[in-house]
Amino acid sequence: MIRIQKTSVIPEKLVRDGKNKRRSHCISYSRNPVAYRSGNKTFLFDRSIYAHISVKRSLIAAQYGKCCFCERLIGTDGDVEHFRPKQAYKQSTGEPLQRPGYYWLAYEWDNLYLACPGCNQRHKQNLFPLQNPTERATNHHQNITSEKPLFIDPGKDNPEEFIGFRGEIAFSIQGNPRGKVTCDSLRLNERSLPEARLQRLQQLKRLWQIVQLAAKQPKNTELKRIAEEAQEELNKATQDNAEYSAASRWAIRTKFQFVIG
Ligand SMILES: [Zn+2]
């Protein structure tokens, strides 16, 4: 997981249609808050707005076609994910769904990311735990700035301050709760993720070994040339547009000591 810099130019579809839709959701809620809280009434969100091709394209560009959580390359296969869930939320997996969700943020640029189906549909779902659940904003009159989300927000936080990697395994730096909740809830050490990261890191380790070898044999010009190419590949792997770049950066920084094979 890495920091995501979204463009400050909000897609026009969200500005125009999203704003109108938001207004109509807020009016509906104000007319009958009890029905929305009990679940007797639910919002009909307009996917053609928040997941409009222009929105998706902007997210793909900002995230280099990668999932905002696991850094898997997904390109156009990703879902537009709401960081704060729009219809309902849960403080933890064992708890019942609370309604409504953050309906007033359904079309907010800051609340949207591109995520892989594994992270979004299977694991994050409606989960949105807070460090201070009593401060949760439960309707559009309340302010989300008092909330302290336990999920790392890649558009606001620098995930690399919270999550590190020992080889292919993600861990929360100094056991901080936000890193731990994000790793555990999104199953960042499960599914096919550790294996995919390990494969990537093993490839990079070979390149790194070539660079180390060349440094010990400065007179070997052929080796030097190969090592320069290897170094270039290593540099590319640490760029934000590379798959699993956070794990690659940690592996290089720790001289691949945790990468087996
Ligand atoms: Zn993912």
Image (cartoon, helix red, strand yellow):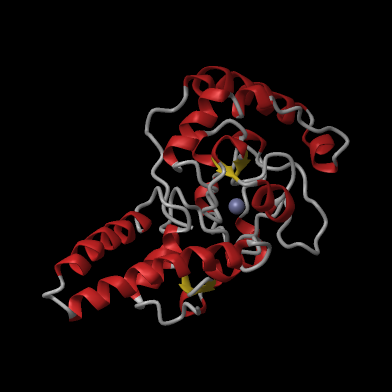
Q: Quadrant of residue 177?
A: bottom right
- Number of on-image labels: 0
The residue depicted at 42 percent of the width and 47 percent of the height is 4
Q: Quadrant of residue 101?
A: top right
Report the residue that reaches farthest toward the right: 40
Q: Nearer the viewer, residue 99 or 6?
A: 6
Q: Residue 83, image x and y in percent?
A: 59, 46
* Residue 132 in view (yes/no): no
Q: Nearer the viewer, residue 63 or 41?
A: 63
Residue 110 drawn above or below residue 54: below
Q: Nearer the viewer, residue 125 or 206?
A: 206
Q: Residue 38, image x and y in percent?
A: 85, 42
Q: Residue 2, image x and y in percent?
A: 44, 56
Q: Residue 40, image x and y in percent?
A: 88, 36
Tell whether 104 sits left or right of 88. Answer: left
Tell whether 199 sits left or right of 212. Answer: right
Residue 52 drawn above or below residue 132: above
* Residue 204 in view (yes/no): yes
Residue 218 drawn above or below residue 61: below
Residue 20 drawn above or below residue 112: above
The residue depicted at 35 percent of the width and 67 percent of the height is 207
